[in-house]
Image (spheres, rainbow, N blue to C red):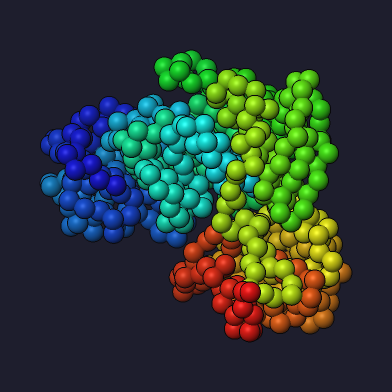
Amino acid sequence: MSDSKGVPLSILLSAIDEVKRIGNSDPLVKGIAYDSREVQPGYLFCALEGIHTDGHRYIEGAIKAGAVSILCRKMPPSLSDRVVYLQVEDPRKAMSRLSAALYQFPSRSLKVIGVTGTDGKSSTVYYIHQFLELLGKKSGLLSTVSLLTGGTLEKNPLRQSTPEAPIIQEVLAEMRDAGKEFAIVEATSHGLSHRTSRLLDVEFDVGVLTNVTHEHLEFHGSWENYLSDKTNLFRALSSTRSTSKACPSFGVTNRDDRSYAYVREHCKVPLYSYSIKSVEADLFATQIDSDLEGNTFQLHENDSSVPCRIPLPGMFNVENVLAALLTVSRLEGVPALSLSPLAKQLKGVRGRMTPIQKGQPFSVLVDYAHTPGAFEKLFPQVRKFTPGRLIAVFGSAGERDVEKRPLQGGIASQYADLIILTNEDPRLEDPMQILEDIAKGCGRKTKERDLFLIPDRMEAIRFAFQKAEAQDTVLLLGKGHESSIILASGPIPWDEIEVAVSLLEELGYRER
């Protein structure tokens, strides 16, 4: 995160409430870092207190690396006369304010759409982006999967879906400087939480919510807190703030989800809804006919309807496209039905219902599904189109929501004939304990008969392929687009699609 010219510290400080300042100089701040290893000469270092370590321990190292100012909650015991110390009550909040100021508040120059929800965020971000681009608009995006600030869509190199405030503000600044009109940002519950303040100084114009199911309770404490943090996106929307951008401010939400009434209560700008069940929604689909290549349905708005086809499999993609259609139609002030012909041009997200075909007699699908809500949508769809057995390979993240593990197992056991539990990202947890937690929900399955616990993900996938027969479907879940598996020893490179292809070739299959 670097601004080569730098901004005087005194200018940045107008954005925060200081508790205590030591040092009278006014250095140029060229960047902001919260990891001392990222500090360069001219940087402001933010000492954050985390789960595994405390940033205050690295202040001295940051100064040696060239930091000109230190932001902290606790003053260090020994002070250097080479830097300016800033003591604040909430360093994360202050870091957000300072980052926005350093990059000259980029979200004020963009029409910013935030997409939140337990499942479907990355896909919905990508579909909104595609609709805007098909209309000739200049759109940037940041999602778990992809990053687009200039002219090329790239794989997101960041492990966090919503990165810390300095990165968010830098990315938005790159979009602004590249001449983008729209910025579509995946807004996670962690990013929207006031505890992290990652998105605190992103001025959203539009909020989109896909659903709220069971996830991240290790951070939020309860489903109610989880919902509340996601709804922060809608609480932040303001009809007066957006007038300067000539952009309408509104919300879009899933009328079928149990979060609908709560979001409607807390959203103070117009709120539009979509549905695959309720005719009361502003945009809804009926007569949905699904296959493994996509979905055909009747699209309804007001008293009119048109047929629509999307080349995206899975019922959940109907919902994601409805969310995207409704959002873009309200942004552009046109009927959603008028945009429906563009839907047939949509492309899917890598690692989302991605088929792998190397000439094998069974189907292989790679998907990112890793929550009970995603499982509830995915498994019935795949089961419906599988003539033979359904074989599921998945795990659950370590140091994350423990309560969801048996729920995952329970849903999978209803639909899958064979379940193979394996590592997702065990981190510092015992991998076998995670798999045993999932297995507790697989009540109908018996170990070593139709339930297998194989921590090594490569071996688990190989085992699944060896077991698969003609007309079976092998579902590889939980990793999707991700580029690593996080073990106790640290991350190791991983590409689920490439691994699947390699293992199929190892077994002698070749694309015809």
Front residue of 49 and 498: 498
Front residue of 373 and 53: 373
For image coordinates 81% across by 60% down, the residue present is 385
For image coordinates 57% across by 29% down, the residue present is 328
> Residue 82's spot in the image, x, y percent?
13, 47
> Residue 455's spot in the image, x, y percent?
63, 77
Quarter the C terminus occupies: bottom right
Above or below, 317 against 432 in this view is above
Image quarter of residue 303 = top right
Give the left or right position of residue 19, taking residue 42 as reference. right
For image coordinates 68% across by 36% down, the residue present is 322
> Residue 477's spot in the image, x, y percent?
66, 63
Give the left or right position of residue 49, taking residue 314 as reference. left
Circle count: 0
Is residue 29 visible in the rendered image? The answer is yes
Give the left or right position of residue 49, taking residue 415 as reference. left
